[in-house]
Image (tube, rainbow, N blue to C red):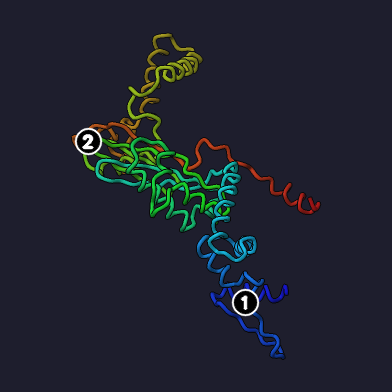
Amino acid sequence: MKFSFCVSLLALASGATAFTFVANAPSARLSTSLSAEVTVALIKELRGATGVGMMDCKKALIEADGDVEIAGENLRKSGLAKADKKASRIAAEGKIVSAMAGNKAVLVEVNCETDFVAKDKGFLAYAASVANAALSVDGDNVVDLLNVEVDGKTLDATRQAMVLKIGENIQVRRMTSVGGTDSVVGSYVHMGKIGVMVELEGGTPELCQDIAMHVAAMNPEYATKEDVPQAALAKEREILTAQAADSGKPANIVEKMVEGRIRKYLEEICLVSQTYVKTNDETVGKLIEKAGAKLKGFTRIVVGEGIEKREDDFAAEVAKMAAGK
């Protein structure tokens, strides 16, 4: 009977609904039936509808007395439980995806547990659908986003189905948007890992994208020096003053040294004062000014930032397996 089931699985993998094996005797012909009610054809039908593994499909069909619809409902109920259970696992990999429509741009971060799944076509298609759906959402509330219906199902229902199919924790972690009636916007995503949006008053979407590429590469902390918190500036001034005081120079010279270093510090951390990386011959501020535009702001997000990643001890895992634990 075990042999019959193995051969039947081979038939399923090859896409056939029947399989014949001849081994020196006519009686070696095998049926596709796994039990009185559950056949390979039924398993194939249920698997195609749910994406669940063959053995899980077989078990669900047996419990449902061969009824594909009931088995599918049970799997979905089970899938919700499995999705909730997997939600506690760390999902720090994934993709940043952008979408634009008119004067609005959005970035979404969709997470999974491994880089392998982050490259999966199904995962990438889901992330793209999430980004496109985000354009229709007012604000940046992920709950509202997950309730948007795409192809007759909410994005959250589709996410839960993917958790069941793929076996990893998948989460729509965040979305952020920029734009307005008087805004020009553009975005850039680097390797699916870093996403940037830039918003200008005036200028062009192409200019926004060029500046977004600069932000992705240089990672400025603030847009302008006016955006730097006074507490952070005071702390930096305190550190620089202590460093300059060790030089033994007169107080008035130390003061000038500190002011010079503060200017350099602000140039490094503020977008408009950074040297534009694409041409290296002018600041981003000058680039924007030449275009007759004004910077309204930028947003930069990175996959998994702020998530504490699990560090696996491979040697310990091997020792545990060797010990039979």
Nearer-the-camera pick, 170 or 201:
170
Q: Amino acid at mark 2?
A: Thr
- Please identify the residue farthest to the left as the structure is shown: 292
Q: Is residue 192 left or right of residue 77?
A: left
For mark 2, give the secondary structure.
loop
- Please identify the residue farthest to the right as the structure is shown: 323
Nearer-the-camera pick, 221 or 311:
311
Number of the front mark, 1 or 2: 1
- Answer whether labels 1 and 2 touch (C-beta < 8 Å): no
Q: Give x and y (percent) for residue 151.
A: 38, 55
Q: Give x and y (percent) for residue 150.
A: 38, 51
Q: Residue at x 54, y 51 (%)?
A: 163
Q: Residue at x 36, y 47 (%)?
A: 133
Q: Is residue 17 left or right of residue 185?
A: right
Residue bearing the label numbered 2: 181
Cα separation, mark 1 vs mark 2, equals 63 Å
Q: Give x and y (percent) for residue 148.
A: 39, 45
Residue bearing the label numbered 1: 32
